[in-house]
Image: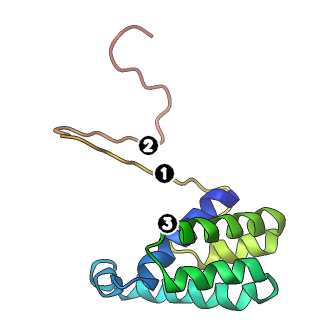
Amino acid sequence: MDPITLATAAVAALAPYLGKAAEKFVGAAGDAAWEKAGELYNGLKARLTGHPAAAEALSDLAHEPADADAQAALRQALKKLAASDADFARELAALTPGAAPAGGTNFHNEIQGNVTNLTQAGSIGALHIGGKE
């Protein structure tokens, strides 16, 4: 998984865990996801002791989990560490809920507006819809 995607996934998993909305997160996501987010936080806290800027960014997010700037600062710190330290990237991927393994595929859909019909397909060879080939 590339460092940007990895850092984004980690922060996305941490923010609800650290926020006041944590109780709703537990109800919606279940105990396993809650435990995994806790493992991520504790793992990062331990691993970032030698990286003061990243440790401070994690602490800032813990104090203000809904703050977009705090989220961005931690994302940036994690991205830099993951890009420069392959061991850290592997550890972060292992701790991050929903992270794809190295060489895996991440897929993100965002749908807005009034969607009446939606079709999603994956692993399709040649797909032609309408018109000529």
Q: Quadrant of residue 58?
A: bottom right
How far apart marks 3 and 2 lie (CA) works out to: 33 Å
Q: Are marks 3 and 2 in contact (CB under 8 Å)?
A: no
Q: Is residue 14 above or below residue 46?
A: above
* Residue 46 versus residue 123 in the image, above or below: below
In percent of width and height, residue 90 lies at 72, 72
Q: Mark 3 or mark 1, which has the lower sequence index?
A: 3
Residue 45 pos. (x, y %): 66, 89
Label 1: which residue? 107
Closer to us: 13 or 104: 13
With 3 as the anchor, is 12 left or right in this view?
left
Depth check, mark 3 against mark 2: the one in front is 3
Q: Which mark is residue 68?
A: 3
| Residue 78 spot, x, y in % from top left | 69, 70
Dot 1 alpha-carbon crowd within 10 angstroms: few under 14, some 14 to 19, many 20 or more:
few
Q: Is residue 122 above or below residue 61?
A: above
Callout 2 amino acid? Gly
Residue placed most toward the observer, 12 or 102? 12
Which residue is disc 2 drawn over? 122
Q: Is the C terminus in the top left, top right, bottom left or bottom right quadrant?
A: top left
CB within 8 Å, label 3 to label 1: no
User: Hey, what amino acid is under mark 1?
Assistant: Phe
Q: Is residue 95 left or right of residue 63?
A: right
Instruction: Please report the residue visible at 53 percent of the width from the left and 85 percent of the height from the top.
Output: 62
SS at mark 1 in the image:
loop
Residue contact between numbered discs 1 and 2, judged by CB atoms under 8 Å: yes
Mark 2 lies on a secondary structure that is loop
